[in-house]
Image (cartoon, helix red, strand yellow):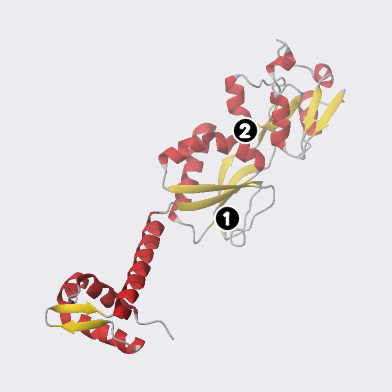
Amino acid sequence: MPLPPLNGLRAFAAAGRHLNFRAAADELGVTQGAVAQQVRGLEDHLGLRLFLREPRGLAFTDEGRAYHLSVSRAFEQLAEATDALRHAPARVTISVTPTFASKWLIPRLSDFTQAHPGIDLRITATERVASFHADGIDLAVRQARPPFGVSLRANLLFTQEVVAVCSPALLAGEGAVDAATLARMTLLHDTHDLWPRFAEEAFGGSVKPARALRFNQTTLSLDAALAGQGVALASRFLVQRDLEAGRLLRPVPHVMEGGLDFYLLSPRQGVSSAAIIVRDWLCAVAKDEAG
């Protein structure tokens, strides 16, 4: 049997609450005749009587009483589901690299959640290039060079200024180190393998270290540097807080322009208002920190 008409169900639910067509009409904002007609239409659709029409109002039939309980429960569930949907936080999914997530974004998330409690920010940490449509991504932060596709909006967050960092314990009170001193330290490498170019620019030649450790992510090499296991290379903005707090030092003053800057990418069309809020916040924080 096909579902009964919704208007008939609404009229039946209201009439059953009041056991009176006039009171039901007042609740629904229609005429008494309209309510009576919709209830009759529902009874015809079901092929049974739901109410007994009595001089002083309405009385349920046995079938009508049982049906009214189910119909009322269904309308209550619809109301609850609609209310939950209306008050659910807006969801924004942002795809970032693991290093950007752990070293920059996560330490600043509390500021965002306090300012925007109605936005449920979901972070996907991956090196893989994300598809906005296929992966359900609203925003993405990636190291890249322009130009970008015509369908994408790109906001520059940070230029890639590469610096060498290590734990203060590793220097034991020494200042800037020369190539010979650096060669006696452990160099921490990541997949970008920037040490040969950095050493060439900083010292005019290669540095052959006594030891080297290699990691598949920059965040791991930075964790190793914080633990005093060697000297790592990273974009300056990723380690700025650690430098300011004294957890890391720069044993080599040279700053290398990396060429792969950090951009915030978003589709030019179809961006939700919540995603725009997140995008504006990220750009504002990055601009403030970049000076």
What is the crowding at mark 1: few (fewer than 14 residues within 10 Å), some, or many (at least 20)? some
Instruction: Give the residue at mark 2.
Output: 238
- How far apart marks 2 and 1 lie (CA) works out to 23 Å
Classify mark 1: helix, strand or loop: loop
Q: Point out residue 188 in the picture as x, y percentages from the top left corner.
A: 78, 29
Q: Which of marks 2 and 1 is in front?
A: 1
The correct choice, above or below, for 2 with respect to 195 in the image is: below
Looking at the rendered structure, the kind of residue marked 2 is Leu
Can residue 206 be seen at all in this image of the molecule?
no
Instruction: Estimate the x, y position of residue 60 in percent, counting from the top left.
Output: 25, 78
Mark 2 or 1, nearer chain start: 1
Residue linked to disc 1: 137
Residue in view at x 70 percent, y 37 percent: 258
Number of labelled discs?
A: 2
Mark 2 vs 1: CB contact within 8 A: no
The spot of residue 90 in percent (x, y) is 45, 53
Q: What element carries label 2?
A: helix
Q: Position of residue 159 (x, y in %)?
A: 62, 38
| Quadrant in which the N terminus appears | bottom left
Q: Is residue 264 visible?
A: yes
Residue 162 placement: quadrant:
top right
